[in-house]
Amino acid sequence: MALIATCATTAFAADPKPDAVVKTRSIEARVFLDDRIKAEAALAADCLTEARKWLDKNAAEAAASRKEDPQLFKGGGWDFERKYAIRSVVADRYVSLLRNDYMDTHGAHPNSDVNTILWDKAEGKRISIRPFFTETADNGPTMKAMVKAVIASLKIEKKKRDTSETAPDEWFKGVEPSLLRIGAVTLAPSTEAGKSSGLTFHYPPYAVGPYAEGEYVAFVPWETLKSYLTAEGVRVFGGARPKGDADEPQ
């Protein structure tokens, strides 16, 4: 028994400490940054500024909900968590981050969300993938080619999960040929050092399939978009997607 207690204590002590937290009668919400983010002062500060706004917003909403219907909180307050993690660093400049949220508001089931951040270390700010493509107009040739490739990838992923019944185009209506509507994007890692093998698009539950199917990740190889690349795009893309990347948590 003493050994079990020691192991449990050790595991508990190893639990990471939140980088930002709010705890009230109505909510407990935590934010975690991975160690690689903490090593980049400007990036860490940017993430924490955003995270604290998220904490304050949800704390206010929880307090208002409790005031309106206290019975909803008989079992305790809401439980929220946000994690920021680096997915790739390309050309020692472009840092892709995943931002994963967990929310339990005592509904039928907890919910989750995923979003992404593309950080330019040289400029010290968030950017989009626009600098890598010659044009990114809504409904333009680049975005149309991107959407076509995304949907093809999603259909493959659905087939792997044996969920072909939810593969009809009805589920993909939200994937639109627009930078703001196509989905949260990261630069995928590559077998070639300092390069990106293409784009990965991240979709939370409900976005392109029923809640039970969970999250989806669509991969678009850089070669598919080769004719639309700028000089900077040509510089940062290359190589292939590392073996196993599709199977790893992203």
Image (tube, rainbow, N blue to C red):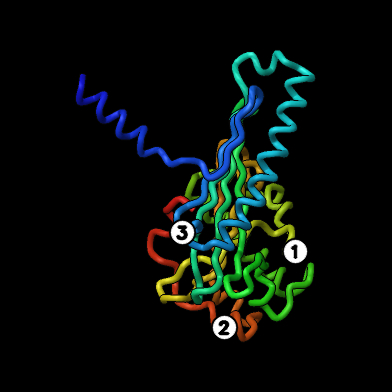
**Lateral position of residue 41 relative to residue 170, left or right:** left
Q: CA distance from mark 3 to mark 2?
A: 26 Å
Please give the residue where the numbered disc 2 appears in the rendered image.
234
**Lateral position of residue 239 relative to residue 229, left or right:** left
Q: Visible in this render: residue 244?
A: yes
Specify which label sits upstream in the sequence, 1 or 3.
3
Identify the image quadrant of residue 245. Answer: bottom left
Please give the residue where the numbered disc 1 appears in the rendered image.
178
Q: Amino acid at mark 2?
A: Val
Specify which label sits upstream in the sequence, 1 or 2.
1
Residue sitting nearer the eye, 119 or 221:
119
Figure check: 170 above or below 78:
below
Q: Position of residue 242 (x, y in %)?
A: 40, 66
Q: Position of residue 70 (x, y in %)?
A: 72, 15
Q: CA distance from mark 1 to mark 3?
A: 31 Å
Figure check: 224 above or below 100:
below
Residue sitting nearer the eye, 81 or 215:
81
Residue sitting nearer the eye, 29 or 238:
29
The residue depicted at 76 percent of the width and 17 percent of the height is: 69
Specify which label sits upstream in the sequence, 3 or 2.
3
> Which label sits on residue 36?
3
Q: Amino acid at mark 1?
A: Ser
User: Which of pointers 1 and 3 indicates the residue nearer the eye?
Assistant: 3
Q: Position of residue 156 (x, y in %)?
A: 53, 56
Identify the image quadrant of residue 154. Answer: bottom right
* Dot 1 crowding, Cα within 10 Å, few <14, some 14–19, many 20+: some
